[in-house]
Image (tube, rainbow, N blue to C red):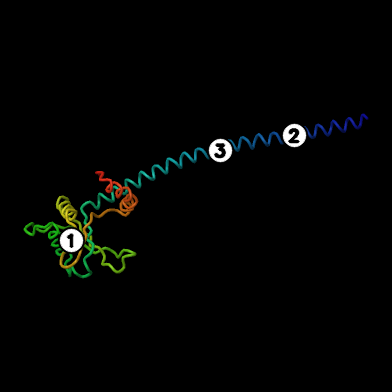
Amino acid sequence: MTTLKDNLKSCIREVQKEVTEVDERVDDLERTIDAREQDQKMVWRCMVTLEEQHIELQLKQEDLENRSRRNNVRIRGMPRDEEGADIMTYTAALLNAVRGDPSWPLPLLDRAHRMVTVPGRTNAAPDILARVYDYTEKEAIIQATQQSTGLELEGHWIQIYQDLSITTLRRRKDFKAVIDKLRTLNVKYQ
């Protein structure tokens, strides 16, 4: 009986020792998990902050891009090689004709060139992009195009747009359904 009792005590001590070791390992694991959860929360907070900063930087970049394009006009609908060798003079005369008063002097252009062909518009001629030196002249041209129902010059229907960044154009396209609904309800908007 005594030997059995001693063996039993010895086994119980070993089991208690193993339980204590397992308990310590579980405590270590719980502390590690708590630390990892805190790290994960910090990473999520940092990620949210970075996403907000990223969006803010994208909006600023879009604004800067649109500001750099502020004096640009995009002319769509002129066939290839219609402008001849001097695209600057041709484009200035075209923009002057759009304004509707041939007595005005030709608008001063910083540059004018054909754009790269847009995918999906392979049959159409590339747009002409022109930078008008004076912003007020550019605005007068844009206003003249908005007041007319269509522009036919030299037998071609053309469209003149304000040059905007691709992201701005995408945003406008996404918002088009809302604008159409406002128009059907005769709601003025800006």
Return the residue at label 3. Answer: 37
* Residue 67 picture location, percent across and down: 25, 49
The residue closer to the viewer here, 117 or 98, is 98
Give the distance between the C-alpha atoms of the residues marked 3 and 2, in whole angstroms: 26 Å
* x 21%, y 66%: residue: 78
Mark 2 residue type: Val
Q: Secondary structure at mark 2?
A: helix
Report whether 66 appears left or right of 6: left
Q: Position of residue 4 (x, y in %)?
A: 90, 32
Which circle's residue, 2 or 1, is located before the other in the chain? Answer: 2
Relative side of 146 to 39, left or right:
left
| Residue at the (27%, 53%) spot, across then down | 164
Residue under circle 2? 19
Q: Quadrant of the C terminus?
A: top left
Write down the residue under mark 1.
Answer: 151
Nearest the viewer among 138 and 12 is 138
Residue 24, image x, y percentages: 69, 34
Q: What whole-number distance in Å separates the C-alpha atoms at marks 2 and 1?
A: 89 Å
Distance between the alpha carbons at the discs numbered 1 and 3: 64 Å
Lower sequence index among marks 3 and 2 = 2
Amino acid type assigned to the residue bearing label 3 in the image: Glu
Q: Is residue 17 left or right of residue 171?
A: right
**Could you tell which of marks 1 and 3 lies nearer the N-terminus?**
3
Q: Nearer the viewer, residue 78 or 91?
A: 78
Q: Amino acid at mark 1?
A: Leu
Which marked residue is nearer to the observer: mark 2 or mark 1?
1
Q: Residue at x 76, y 33 (%)?
A: 17
Of marks 1 and 3, the one in the foreground: 1
Which one is in front, 98 or 72? 98
Callout 1: 10 Å neighbours few (<14), some, many (20+)? Answer: some
